Image: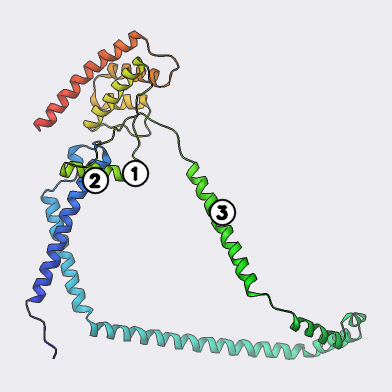
Amino acid sequence: AHRPLPAELFYLIILLFGAGMLALAFSSMKITIGLDRALGMGQRRISAMPQMNRYWLSTVFLTVIGLLTAGIAAGIFLAPEQLRRLLDAVGAVISWIGNIVGMVLVAISYVAFAVLYLFFRLLEPLIQRLLDRMADSPLADLVPPQQDMERMKEVAQGTAPLPESYRWIGLAIVVALVVLLFALALRRLQSETETNEDEIRESILTADLLQNQLSNLWNRWFGRGRGASDPFLSLDGESDARRRIRAIYQQLLAGAAATGAARTPAETPNEYARHLAQAWHTHEQALATITAAYQQARYAPNDPDAAQDAAVNTAWADLSKYFDKEEADLQDN
């Protein structure tokens, strides 16, 4: 016998769906913050990161309540009986429209065939006269006799059909050509990779990079996993002067990124120096000195001289004090 469902089951289902959506919202918030830190590599300001504040909580609760209300309303208005009636009404309307369209098409076809019949009836004498003249024309001798026509039909009917194996072979050849063209196109796309490098590794979302970033996220959350990879290019093989200047410039990039003034991929070193000078309103001379020395160490064929190396060290000593002050202010806040 059919047993009715308990009355309190409805409230338990609503509670289950509400708790599930709230848990999904909180877990999504945690994953979003973690991915923002992992994929952003610390380049976003702390104030710009997602936060679990009152606005977020009120938005989540209102969204959950709205979804539950919409689901209850849909269940009331779209019950199986209501849905069946709606489909019956829609089917009746479609059938009525189809009957009207069919009647219109029949009427149009009747009128069109009547006009064509009268037209050909008027042209019948002219067509008959043309056929008679064609029979008396010398071109009629070019038409093959009836016996030849019958013989050609017999030859056509006696022609052996194309074997089924030939069709499969042709299909296999076509498929092989398509696969070959696709492989060549894929190989060409893979070979067209950009070799332009910068002092900072770009965050292009590949499978290996995503796996590395997820392992870094796992390491931040649970204290295990692979260590974080160096975001900067290796300085192996460089001379001492080039290595020192480029290492200082990398420290400048890391310190600026920690303060929320990270370099964008489209910015040149000179543009980035002007950007930092406008953002900080100070240290223009130190930034210009380090940027000029970095371009000399990175791109020039000659190594930087001792005077340039000393100037970079002096400029970095000035900037490092600024970074230490900014870090202390950030920790106090």
Residue sitting at the far top: 307
Is there a contact, CB below 8 Å, between mark 1 and mark 3?
no
In the picture, measured across the screen, residue 63 lies left or right of residue 298, that is left
The residue carrying mark 2 is: 35
Residue 119 locus on image (x, y percent): 71, 87
The residue carrying mark 1 is: 208
**Above or below, comparing residue 157 to residue 194 in the picture:** below
How far is disc 3 from disc 2 in space, using C-alphas? 39 Å
Residue sitting at the far left: 8
Residue 180 locus on image (x, y percent): 56, 54
How would you rate the neighbour count of disc 3 (Cα within 10 Å): few for under 14, some for 14-19, many for 20 or more?
few
The residue carrying mark 3 is: 181
Of helix, strand and loop, which one carries label 3? helix
Of helix, strand and loop, which one carries label 1? helix
Compare residues 173 and 25 and report the one nearer the observer: 173
Q: Residue flagged by tag 3: what amino acid is it?
A: Leu
Residue 168 locus on image (x, y percent): 60, 69
Which is nearer the N-term, disc 1 or disc 3?
3
